[in-house]
């Protein structure tokens, strides 16, 4: 099987906002930057405490909660972090059954250097498996 490092498929352009950022600003940032999630930091920009994705915003609206009254600190999700040294196969074997939809890719200093969606990981892993098995669809 071809070996692909997760650093080759992660998103490197990280959008980071403070834990104090209003939900309306987060929603606008998601739209303007055309991304599905923003990293949330507390204090220093390297102190990532989690992320907020478009689903969290949709959930607020579906629950008839006013995004102008909700603090981002109450809706962010913890970011599951994995080391940058993993290959696609290794990460899939370790996290394929996880409920997490996004993962932070961290360097040896535990600094988040990228984001990887589980959907992207699954797609690439499936392509590698098909290639290894000689399956064409």
Image (cartoon, rainbow, N blue to C red):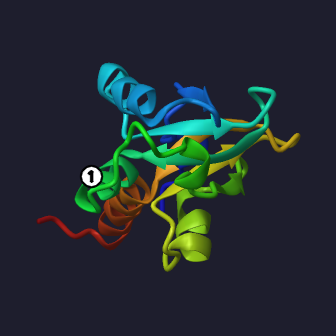
Identified at 53% across, 27% down, the residue is 15
Where does the image place residue 130, in percent across and percent down from the top left?
A: 29, 67
- Along the horizontal axis of the image, is 34 left or right of 98? left
Identified at 49% across, 80% down, the residue is 97
Where does the image place residue 112, in percent across and percent down from the top left?
A: 70, 39
Among all residues in the image, which is located at the extreme top?
Answer: 32
Query: Is residue 13 depicted above or below 104 in this figure?
Result: above
Query: Is residue 134 depicted above or below 72 in this figure?
Result: below
Callout 1 environment at 10 Å: few (<14), some (14 to 19), or many (20+)? Answer: few
Where does the image place residue 3, in percent across and percent down from the top left?
A: 55, 54
Among all residues in the image, which is located at the extreme bottom?
Answer: 97
Residue 130 in view here:
yes
Instruction: Say which residue label 1 marks.
Output: 61
Q: Secondary structure at mark 1?
A: helix
Depth order, front residue of 62/134: 62
Identified at 65% across, 37% down, the residue is 19
């Amino acid at each position: 099987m071809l070996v692909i490092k997760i650093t080759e498929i992660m998103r490197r352009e990280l959008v980071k906002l403070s834990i104090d950022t209003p939900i309306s600003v987060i929603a606008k940032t998601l739209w303007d930057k055309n991304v599905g999630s923003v990293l949330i930091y507390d204090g220093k920009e390297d102190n990532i405490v989690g992320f907020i994705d478009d689903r969290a915003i949709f959930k607020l609206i579906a629950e008839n909660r006013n995004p102008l009254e909700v603090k981002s600190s109450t809706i962010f999700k913890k970011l599951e972090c994995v080391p940058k040294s993993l290959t696609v196969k290794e990460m899939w074997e370790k996290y394929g059954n996880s409920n997490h939809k996004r993962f932070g890719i961290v360097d040896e200093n535990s600094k988040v250097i990228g984001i990887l969606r589980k959907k992207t990981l699954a797609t690439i892993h499936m392509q590698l498996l098909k290639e290894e098995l000689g399956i064409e669809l």
